[in-house]
Image (tube, rainbow, N blue to C red):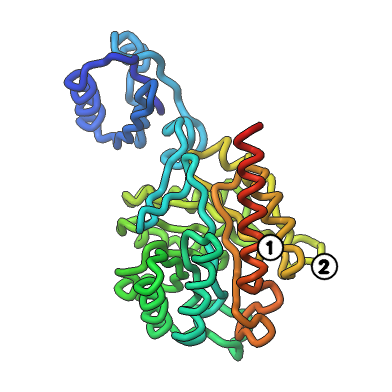
């Protein structure tokens, strides 16, 4: 249920109303915008007398929310959320970010070199896999804790906040200095992991599962937010369809749909979606034009020798071209 408060309401009145809700065992989510304040009420709201509530001078209107996702719902939070990702970098609310780096951290020299080059080309954050979920048990599984240390060294040298994937809640102590924790497609519905991440205070980059609906993605975000962590960034990375030419099918409609339903920012990963370096640029431009809040691009200094996903990785030079063209698209949209 949402309660919209009239402009000009005194803070003391608002606090009294919030206390009244909490005294009935309800959780209150407060969203203060430029023009209005919205109270999102979560819990057994059936006991609330709506007629009584609407009769209060401070209340503009009351509305029950039937969607199962509450805190992620735009009705609860009408204005776009802006997520602080460390180092002054923000995603959402008009802030756009380029997240770039290799699929896997392979060595200190490799990740530091790529970090320097993507930063120079315009990247806002550095991505790199330390724990790698692979379909085959014989493929490279990542450098794990050592890989995170290498990412942190690259961060110290370049100042770029880092994004890396978590596989298990037991690994959380290793992520204390990581700026943004990524939940991969395979773990989107690992609910015990999501609950643990809900107890952290770190931004979570939540990737859509390869066979999951947008509603299921929203509900996974709700798991994290229900635990108290509301710093969620959605990531569309393609879904599995009958098409085999591309690695996955990039669902660009996810951008406007998620923005209509939720206040949380949306990032697009055209690298995993297409699986082909030649397709990354056009899909990145299309995602930008669709209104995405950022892009996640795989960049490797030598894609032909990459230990993971070299076929979809751009060289730093090609990433620089992408960054320039994305900037032009954003400028054109701002002028439209």
Q: Residue at x 43, y 58 (%)?
A: 204
Q: Residue at x 45, y 42 (%)?
A: 72
Q: Provide the residue designation for mark 2.
A: 245
**Taking the image as drawn, is residue 291 in sight?**
yes
First in sequence: mark 2 vs mark 1 = 2
The spot of residue 320 in percent (x, y) is: 62, 64
Vertical arrangement, residue 268 with respect to residue 7, above or below: below
Q: CA distance from mark 2 to mark 1?
A: 11 Å
Q: Provide the residue designation for mark 1.
A: 273
Vertical arrangement, residue 32 with respect to residue 179, above or below: above
Of 154 and 271, nearer the camera is 154
For label 2, count other residues whose C-alpha is less than 10 Å away and answer few (under 14), some (14-19) or many (20+): few
Q: Residue at x 37, y 17 (%)?
A: 50
Of 40 and 148, nearer the camera is 148
The spot of residue 202 in percent (x, y) is: 34, 58
- Quadrant in the picture for residue 276: bottom right
Q: Secondary structure at mark 1?
A: helix
The spot of residue 247 in percent (x, y) is: 73, 68
The spot of residue 231 in percent (x, y) is: 39, 50
Vertical arrangement, residue 77 with respect to residue 324, above or below: above
Q: Residue at x 67, y 59 (%)?
A: 238
User: What is the quadrant of the N terminus in the image?
Assistant: top left
- Quadrant in the picture for residue 193: bottom left
């Amino acid at each position: 249920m949402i309660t919209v408060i009239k402009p000009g309401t005194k803070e003391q009145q608002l606090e009294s109303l919030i206390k009244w809700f909490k005294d009935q065992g309800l959780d209150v989510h407060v969203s203060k915008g430029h023009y209005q304040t919205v109270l999102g009420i979560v819990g057994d709201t059936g006991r609330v007398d709506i007629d009584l509530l609407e009769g209060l001078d401070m209340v503009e209107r009351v509305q029950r929310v039937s969607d199962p996702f509450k805190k992620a719902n735009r009705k609860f939070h009408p204005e776009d959320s802006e997520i602080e990702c460390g180092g002054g970098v923000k995603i959402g609310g008009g802030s756009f970010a380029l997240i770039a780096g290799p699929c896997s951290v392979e060595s200190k020299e490799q990740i530091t070199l790529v970090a320097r080059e993507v930063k120079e080309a315009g990247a806002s954050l550095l991505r790199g896999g330390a724990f790698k979920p692979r379909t085959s048990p014989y493929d490279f599984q990542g450098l794990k804790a050592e890989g995170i240390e290498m990412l942190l060294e690259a961060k110290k040298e370049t100042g770029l906040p880092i994004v890396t994937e978590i596989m298990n809640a037991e690994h959380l102590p290793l992520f204390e200095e990581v700026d943004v924790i990524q939940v991969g497609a395979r773990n989107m519905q690992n609910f015990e992991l999501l609950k643990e991440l809900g107890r952290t205070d770190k931004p979570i980059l939540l990737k859509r599962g390869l066979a999951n609906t947008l509603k299921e993605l929203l509900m996974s975000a709700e798991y994290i937010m229900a635990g108290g962590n509301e710093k969620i960034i959605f990531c569309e990375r393609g879904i599995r369809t009958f098409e085999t030419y591309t690695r996955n099918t990039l669902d660009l409609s996810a951008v406007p749909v998620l923005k209509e339903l939720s206040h949380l920012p949306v990032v697009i990963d055209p690298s995993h979606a297409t699986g082909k370096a030649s397709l990354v640029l056009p899909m990145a431009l299309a995602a930008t034009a669709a209104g995405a809040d950022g892009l996640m691009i795989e960049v490797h200094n030598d894609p032909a020798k990459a230990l993971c996903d070299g076929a979809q990785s751009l060289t730093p030079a090609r990433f620089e071209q992408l960054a320039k063209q994305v900037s032009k698209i954003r400028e054109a949209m701002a002028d439209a």
